[in-house]
Image (cartoon, helix red, strand yellow):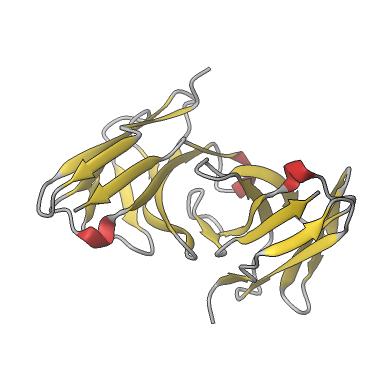
Amino acid sequence: NAGVTQTPKFQVLKTGQSMTLQCAQDMNHEYMSWYRQDPGMGLRLIHYSVGAGITDQGEVPNGYNVSRSTTEDFPLRLLSAAPSQTSVYFCASSETHSGNTIYFGEGSWLTVV
Amino acid sequence: RKEVEQDPGPFNVPEGATVAFNCTYSNSASQSFFWYRQDCRKEPKLLMSVYSSGNEDGRFTAQLNRASQYISLLIRDSKLSDSATYLCAVPVYNQGGKLIFGQGTELSVKP
């Protein structure tokens, strides 16, 4: 019963490097999203998707790209990592647009040096 | 004004105490509200949903005040295991599981 799976769990990047955070869900959910969490800031929405082939920006999209080629996968790409992107990243999926069916992955800890 | 705002705390309370957190929201059209619990370095997990005036689950009670645009979470008979950060969240209607979170309120229950 995997739910939402994120990889990697921990990553250290150098400034300017690019990388992809992977997110996969096995619940056939239409809605998927990426959040970042910084101390004292709660969770902030980066990008979200309402289905395969459809993505949209959230509150803090700059520096990140997403794509949704399949229902299961929603990778988050950092194009040119910056120290300001040091954060914990959570992927989430949802069956509906209401909040009570949202499932989060375990998080990815990213440090940019 | 932030869309969803919480008192960050920390709230330090003794075991057995009753503690309440508030969360204010700016969109008066919001219909549903959620309290999530987040343990240190873990993902948020749904604690309670609030769709009308309130909801109760054991020691936890969530109440909604639409006139003043806030929701509250009341924890009675606090346990050490209640120590966590409590996040309130408001979904953006019809926008695909898009949640707006407050900053979170940290609770520490002491023996």
Percent position of residue B24, x then y: 67, 73
- Residue at image x 71%, y 64%? B11
Percent position of residue B3, x then y: 55, 72
Horizontal placement of A10 versus A30: left or right? left
Count of labels shown? 0
Comparing B75 with A2, the one in front is B75
Q: Is residue A103 above or below residue B84?
A: above
Comparing B91 with B14, the one in front is B14
Percent position of residue B8, x then y: 61, 68
Horizontal placement of B37 versus A8: left or right? right
- Residue at image x 48%, y 49%? B96
**Which quarter of the image is occupied by the N terminus of chain B?**
bottom right
Horizontal placement of A72 versus A80: left or right? right
Query: Visible in this render: residue A16?
Result: yes
- Residue at image x 55%, y 45%? B40
Comparing B87 with B110, the one in front is B110
